[in-house]
Image (cartoon, rainbow, N blue to C red):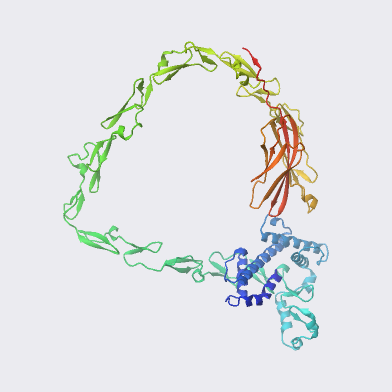
Amino acid sequence: MAPLIFMLFSIYGVLNGQESRDPISMEDCCKDGRDRGQESQDCSSLPLISESTTCRIAQEQCCAAVLEDTSCTSGINMAKDQGACEALLTGSTCEAKTAKMCCDCCLLGKAAQETGMACDHSLSVSYQCGLVSRACCNYGSPELEGNGTLSGDAQDNNSSQVSGTGSDSADLSEPNELCKEAKCGQKCEGNGTCACHAGFKLKPDGKACEDINECLLGSYSCRPGERCINTLGSYRCQRDVSCGTGYELTDSNQCKDIDECETGTHNCPAEFACQNTPGSFRCRPKVQCGDGYIQDALGSCIDINECLSQSGPCPTGQMCFNTVGSYTCQRNSVSCGRGYHLNEEGTRCVDIDECTQPDGSCAGHGCINLVGSYRCECRSGYIFNSISRVCEDINECRHYPGRLCAHKCENILGSYKCSCTTGFKLSSDGRNCDDVNECESNPCSQECANVYGSYQCYCRRGYQLSDVDGITCEDIDECALPTGGHICSYRCHNSPGSFHCSCPDTGYTLAPNGRSCQDVDECLAGTHTCTESESCFNVQGGFRCLSFTCPPNYRRSGETRCERLICNQSSECLTLPVRITHYQLTFPINIRTPTNIFRMGPSNIFPGDQVDIAIMEGNEDGYFGTQRVPSGGVMTVQRPIDKPKDFEVSLVMTLIRHGMLSTYMAKVLVFVTEDQPSLPNTVTPN
């Protein structure tokens, strides 16, 4: 990551030349990006501090460099402290993957050190993985302590020796011919050997220099509660705990209040002024209200009604009148309005209690006194007329037509009464009308139904009314009717007033509806002959004994599932299905086509997912087909199956999610059976 930052600063001259008019320098843009990276912000959507495109690039790249370096350091520390990386397996973000890579590569270096192997191994890993592996391999070894990269004060001393004044520096002031030919990246020794500044080391080519990541090497001296952040040519220590909202971390590792008013990050409206507070800010109205007004939350000035105060601003005998921003006091007048009269002192008007008057204002109804008036509480069936101030009768029949009485409504004073038409009598609730029940005299041989103004005879189930007198009931032979053969699914037996059905002696039993024959579930009843290692699956008129074993490189998971074992990066193994699940289906012959019989798809669909299913085996006769649906795919019966048959269909689903291909297999056992037994012409007489 350090070479990436070095490259960004190397092209600074070009970028600065293209946008020299921007007052913000590239160093400011990069520093802003690194600061936001240390706060773990999203580097792809940072707030821009300049309209310059190159400044945006510097912000994003410097932010990404800090996030990747921090994630890598976290992974290395986990490898050093815990010696395992399983805690990082659940993460799917870019930072989690970087931490996982650095943790694994550090474990490679530690393993090389423990086995006595060379730290500069020849494994074909990435460049950053090689750096991390070598750093963890050299960590704590005698060679590193004696000859490794210098850090802290040792680096400063080495730097001063190279750049100090003296006889040696005089020889380096003018490059000799050897140095000109060496083309060193940073500086050249007098003998043409390339060297680097403090905090850098030579690359394998012996010319270019790369940053030393002191955080990776463990050659830093941060205090407890601080973490190491690598910088170009050095490092710095930063607090692990953030300062919290409203504060920022300074270069001296201290929490400083953010002045939102000065930075312009507040949200105060234009008519409000921003006032900074420790860790936050407040919005104060710019316009201050004068005496007689109160300011609301929106900054508006609202008049205060002083007359509503408990003490009252005016002296006794005077009335208070509110004005805009103030009030006035006026002496009471001696004339009172309707509903009031002067008190005994003659200083103010008091309410008249009309309800206590001897004339009875509400004429026998309830009276409620009000300030300056009164209101009658009318009895049920009356309503108060606010103009005449009396209780008037409510004509319920006219106000609620058809809602009070079933037949006829007649209004009476304070109420109403209902009556019925000829052939009906008033019910006990006084509103509905009951028909006169002629059936109480038993005019029918079996059942009698009362109807409005009359009655009708009818027979119980299994009998029919005689066409001769319309009163007598005769037995119906259900089995002899034109549709009698369809009453029972197998065999019909007539009986007086009814019938009953029967089924074949074995394999079926009579359904709860008494007509259909339903299959006997031998698996549920325990009458099957399956062994303990087999599972029983019921079909129409019988059962099947099922068992399955998982193929090589799979393990059994649950009753019907085989899970693929870890592939260890084997390309042949990765092409195998992740999971093999066994299903069973059964249905009768001659079902309607096409018919969907099985659905297969992922439990969750994400944008960009590509799902496809295909039949791999068991469809040689082409009875089945597949069809894509939004949630995956379905297997359908596309050709009629006119005879019983068993199928073993292998259905494969491929899922491409985020560029990764996964395969899942469903082995579907399909048992096509005979339909329920039906003998429509078999009738047994009674």
- Where the C terminus falls, by quadrant? top right
**447 lies left or right of 375:** right
Question: Which residue is at the front of the view, 556 or 243?
Answer: 556
The percent coordinates of residue 345 (x first, y second) are 16, 54
**391 lies left or right of 466:** left
Residue beneath the point at 63% across and 76% down: 18
Instruction: Name above or below for residue 682 compared with residue 405.
Output: above
Residue beneath the point at 20% across and 40% down: 361
Question: Which residue is at the front of the view, 299 or 502?
Answer: 502
Name the residue furthest top: 468
Instruction: Name above or below for residue 654 compared with residue 467.
Output: below
The answer to which quarter of the image holds residue 497 is top right
The answer to which quarter of the image holds residue 97 is bottom right
The percent coordinates of residue 35 (x first, y second) are 61, 69
Instruction: Name above or below for residue 45 compared with residue 666.
Output: below
Question: Which residue is at the front of the view, 678 or 247?
Answer: 678
Residue beneath the point at 77% across and 45% down: 554
The percent coordinates of residue 379 (x first, y second) are 27, 36
Instruction: Name above or below for residue 537 compared with residue 615.
Output: above
Question: Which residue is at the front of the view, 461 or 531?
Answer: 461
The answer to which quarter of the image holds residue 409 is top left
Residue 471 visible in the picture: yes
- Where the N terminus falls, by quadrant? bottom right
